[in-house]
Amino acid sequence: MMVLLREEIIFNTSKIELKKSNLRNNIQFLNSTIGQNRKLSIVVKGNAYGHGYENYIPLLKSQGVDHFSVFSAQEAFEVKKYLDNKDGLMIMGDTPFEALEWVIKNNVEIFVFNVERLKNLATIAKNLKQPARIHLEFETGMKRTGIEEKKIKDVISFLKKNTEHFDLRGVCTHLAGAESISNYLRIKEQIKTFQRIKKTFKDSGLKIRYFHCACSAAAIRYPETRMDLIRVGILSYGFWPSQETLIEYLNRSRSHRNPLRRVIEWKTSVMAIKTVSRGDFIGYGSSFQATREMKLAVLPIGYETGFSRSLSNKGSVLIDGQYAYIVGTVNMNALTVNVTHIPDVKIGDEAVIIGKQGKNEISVAAFSDLGEQLNYELLTRLPLNIPRKVVS
């Protein structure tokens, strides 16, 4: 585990806190709602959606999670440092040919989405005298990666001839946008195609541990996709794939309460206080001119630390439990907020960028919507050098 020096935490301009109790709540929700008698594989690609491998993976393990999904071999290499031998690790995307030997030797599971990769793995597994743990990904309508359905017979035939070289962990597909009702017909057609593929493999006599196609959105919106394994990403972190998905869940459950709790909070502190007169321009350029005397607080964060420049003159933070709106342009390392209405604000006061303070809250969704970003995008862009700390 990476250990941050005390000086690194003191000197950094902002910090991220991860709430253990909120993660516990989310895992309990997943198990009770979509994970009964099913394996949950928590997706931790993108530095665990910006939460940080070194803290978030041990946190997940403390809640009983023992299977993890990443995009690439490079991510698998990083995540493997925090896992035990009994933990499952699955690569869903990029694995260069040069990494295949490492994958097999380390019992890492890997998506196979073309016949060439299948043959390469068979050759390497034969040389190593160790089977490759594979998940066959089939094309059902995503049009990105996946073996074509017409090649199923050839694939099955190859697997039967090379049984000793493969541990066939799963057969799967990737759904194209289950978070939006606009994709309903496309998703339903994908599910239908995958059910057909599933039957073919069931009838093949091959031993397969998991059939899986559900992501977070599909697991909520399309119950028929809850098969043997569910690849859960954004839900585990306390976010919904879309507002639409949350509304549909609340309607189905006849509830008015969001059952998820956000694990992440991002905070900084006031660096300087400034009083300006009416007519003064604030910061670089002339994007904001004071219409009256104003008190401003300067915060030591900017687009270099993950706070989008597109939030200039429209984003906000929380100081003393109150919203403080950005005035002027977000700079590389600093931004300015209006604190005229917060009389007691002083240098060193906490400013919440994402999270709760008092009765108010700034969610990632609200934060990212103003910046015209997906919440996924904002989270994964949080710089690696912001210290992450687990709190109860």
Image: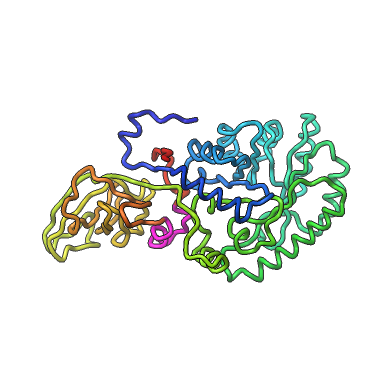
- What are the residue bounds of the magenta stretch? 364-378
| Residue 336 relative to residue 28: left or right | left
Residue 32 position in % (x across, y down): 60, 53
Quadrant location, the C terminus: top left
Between 193 and 129, the one nearer to me in the picture: 193
Q: Position of residue 11 (x, y in %)?
A: 30, 34
Residue pictured at 64% horizontal, 43% vertical: 91
**For residue 259, above or below residue 18:** below
The image position of residue 310, as x and y in percent, is 36, 59
Check the image and tell me how it is coloured.
rainbow
| Residue at the spot 66% in from the left edge and 71% down from the top edge | 185
Residue 65 within the magenta-colored segment of the rendering? no
Q: Is residue 156 left or right of residue 229?
A: right
- Residue 120 quadrant: top right
> In which image quadrant can residue 268 be found?
top left
Q: Position of residue 125 (x, y in %)?
A: 77, 34
Tell which of 62 and 137 is nearer to you. 62
Report the predominant secondary structure element of the magenta stretch: helix
Residue 152 horizontal side relative to residue 183, left or right: right
Q: Is 116 rendered above or below residue 178? A: above
Residue at image x 67%, y 60%? 143
The tally of labels here is: 0
